[in-house]
Amino acid sequence: MTKGLRKGLTSYGDAGFSLFLRKAFIKAMGYSDDALERPIVGITNTYSDYNPCHGNVPVLVEAVKRGVMLAGAMPMVFPTISIHESFAHPTSMYLRNLMAMDTEEMIRAQPMDAVVVIGGCDKTLPAQIMAAVSADLPTVVLPVGPMVVGHHKGEVLGACTDCRRLWSAHRAGELDEEEIGAVNGRLAPSVGTCMVMGTASTMACITETLGLSLPMSATIPAPHAERVRCAEASGKRAAEMAVTGGPKPSELLTPSAFRNAQVVLQAIGGSTNGLIHLTAIANRTTHRVDLEAFDQLGRDVPVLVDLKPSGLHYMEHFHHAGGVPKLMKQLGDLIDLDAKTVAGGTLREIVRDAEEVPNQDAIRPRAQPIKPEGAMAILHGNLAPRGAVIKHSAASPKLLQHTGRAVVFESVEDLAARIDDPNLEVSADDVLVLRNAGPKGAPGMPEAGYLPIPKKLGSQGVKDMVRISDARMSGTAFGTIVLHITPESADGGPLGLVKTGDRIKLDVSARSIELLVDDAELARRREALAKLPPAKTPKRGYAKLFTETILQADEGCDFDFMAGTGE
Ligand code: FES
C-alpha cells in the first residue's frame, strides 16, 4: 500500500514526475530525504485569533509533533477552518458542515498515513469527527480541554452556565452595571472550552467514549501540563497507527460504540446538541442513532456526573474525580467494555485502570445518582411529528407536566424586539413559542431555544417557564425548554400553525408535546399558510448549498449528500 509522501499524488499523468515535483517543492522547507521517507502524521491547526477556546492549540501542536517524531514518523501541520461560538455569524452550526467538508477534503487531498485532529469549541470536534469518519484514515482526536474555573466574591464561576444565570440576574436588576462588568472578566479565566457540561465538554466525553481519543483526554484542563503530555502521547499513538494502518474510525465506530456514547450522553447530563452531532457522526457511517432507543436509554441510565447545568461541579472536578474512565466504571453493565479504542485495546482495560479517588463527589455511584433518569427525553405529539428533545435533568420539576397558553414569536428578531416589551401580554404560566429558528428557517438553527424570561416576569422573581422552539440551546443553559421540534416550521412543521392564545400541553413522563387545537382548525390554518408567498431563499454560494441540502435535527443537520453508504 502506498504510504507517506507517495500517497495521493497530484495528477500530471506521470507518477514519477509528480513525486519528483512534490519532493522538489517540499524541500524548500528544509526537509531531508530521511524525513520525507517516514510515515506522515497530519495535524490539523485550528488556531485562530477569533477562537480563544483554541488558544492552547500552538502548544498542543508542538507536543503532538514531538510525540510523532519520538515515534519515528514525520509530522505535517496543516490549517483548517476554526469556529468559535461567539464569532460565528449567523451561527456556529451553520458552519459545522463547512468545517467538516474542509477537514475531510484536506485529509484526503494531502499525503498522510494518520491524522491528529485538535479541536474543542462546540462544533469543531463534531466537524472533525464527521470528517475523519468520512475520510476513514487512522485518526486520534485531541480535545483542547476545558478552561479552569473562575471566582467572584467567593463563588465559583464557569462559562457559560453562570454567564446566563448572572446575565438573567442583571436583567432582573439584581446585579448592577459595575458588578456585571467585573463578572464579565472572570467567567472565562483561561484558554480552553466552556468548563460546564456544555456542548464542548459533552462532545469531548462522547469522543473519549467512542474510543477516538486517549483516556482522560476529555477532561484534563486546557492549561495543565498533563494536557500537553496527552498531546505528546496522541502524536506518538498516531505515528504507530500510521505504520500499522489502524485502527480506522470505521473499525472503532460500531453499534456498541454508538450505544456507549448515548449512555454516557445521558449519564453526564450532556448537551442536547450532543444528540444532533452524534446523529450526524453516525449518519456518516452505516449505523444510525435511533431516537426511540435513545429515549429508552434515558429511562434506564441515571445522571451520575454532578456538573453544571444539571448539577454543581465543573469539568476540572470531573477530571480530578477520575474522568470518563471512572464514569464508565460506575455505569457498570450499561457500557459494552468490548468496544475498541484508539489507545490500542478495549474500554475494558481503560475502565480497569480508572483512578479511585476517595471521597470524590463529582461522579456518583449508580445507587446515589444525581437524577434517577438520564439527561434527555424525546417527545412526540401533533406539534413534533418527528420528535423534539428536552433536557429534563436541567428543567424545573414542577413544569415537566404543564399546560399553558402559547405566546408566539415569529422569529429570533421578533423575539428580540418584543420579549421585554412592558405591554407584552404574558404570565408565568404561559408557554413561550419561537419558530423559524430551525436548520433552514434561521438559517443554521441558532441557540435561541433558551428564550429569555420576559423582563417584567424576571423582575417578579420568575426564573423558569416552558419554552418551545425548533431552535437549539446551548448545553450550558438551564430551564424547561423543548428544542429541535421536527420538522421545523420553515419546513412545513406544525409549529408554524400555532397562534398566540392556543393551549399547549407538555407531559415529559408521557413523552408528549401537544397543541390542543382540533385537527379541522389546524387543517384550515395549514391551507391559509399555503397561500402565502414562499419565503425567499439564498441564490448563491454556501448559503444556497446549506438551505437546499440541510437535513432536519432528527437526521443530524448534515447535508443530505454526505451520508455514509458503506461503499
Ligand atoms: Fe468555545 Fe464554549 S465558547 S466551548
Image: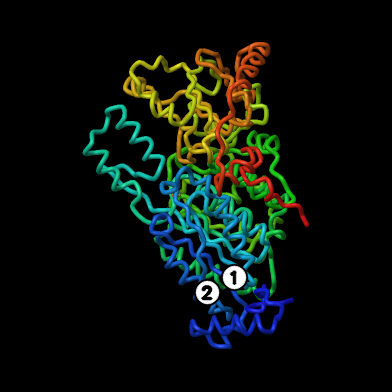
Q: Is mark 1 within 8 Å of ligand 1?
A: no
Measured from the top left, where is residue 483 in percent x and y?
Answer: 55, 32
Measured from the top left, where is residue 22 in percent x and y?
Answer: 60, 80
Extreme bottom residue here? 33
Location of residue 439 (image quadrant) = top right
Which of the two residues, 190 or 375, is positioned nearer the viewer here? 190
**Any part of residue 118 in sight:** yes
Q: Which mark is residue 103?
A: none
Which of the two residues, 329 or 298, is positioned nearer the viewer here? 298
Mark 2 touching mark 1, by CB under 8 A? yes
- As helix, strand or loop, the secondary structure at mark 2 comes to helix
* Quarter of the image where the C terminus is located: bottom right
What amino acid type should be assigned to the residue bearing mark 2?
Answer: Gly
Which of the two residues, 336 or 69, is positioned nearer the viewer here? 69
Q: Residue at the spot x=60%, y=56% of the render?
A: 101
- Above or below, 524 against 68 in this view is above
- As helix, strand or loop, the secondary structure at mark 1 comes to helix
What amino acid type should be assigned to the residue bearing mark 1?
Answer: Arg
Q: Is residue 530 left or right of residue 271?
A: right
- Above or below, 565 against 292 in this view is below
Q: Is mark 2 within 8 Å of ligand 1?
A: no
Q: Residues within 10 Å of mark 1 (few under 14, many from 20)?
A: many
* Quarter of the image where the N terminus is located: bottom right
Q: Which mark is residue 237?
A: 1
- Above or below, 191 against 166 in this view is below
Per the image, the residue denoted by label 2 is: 67
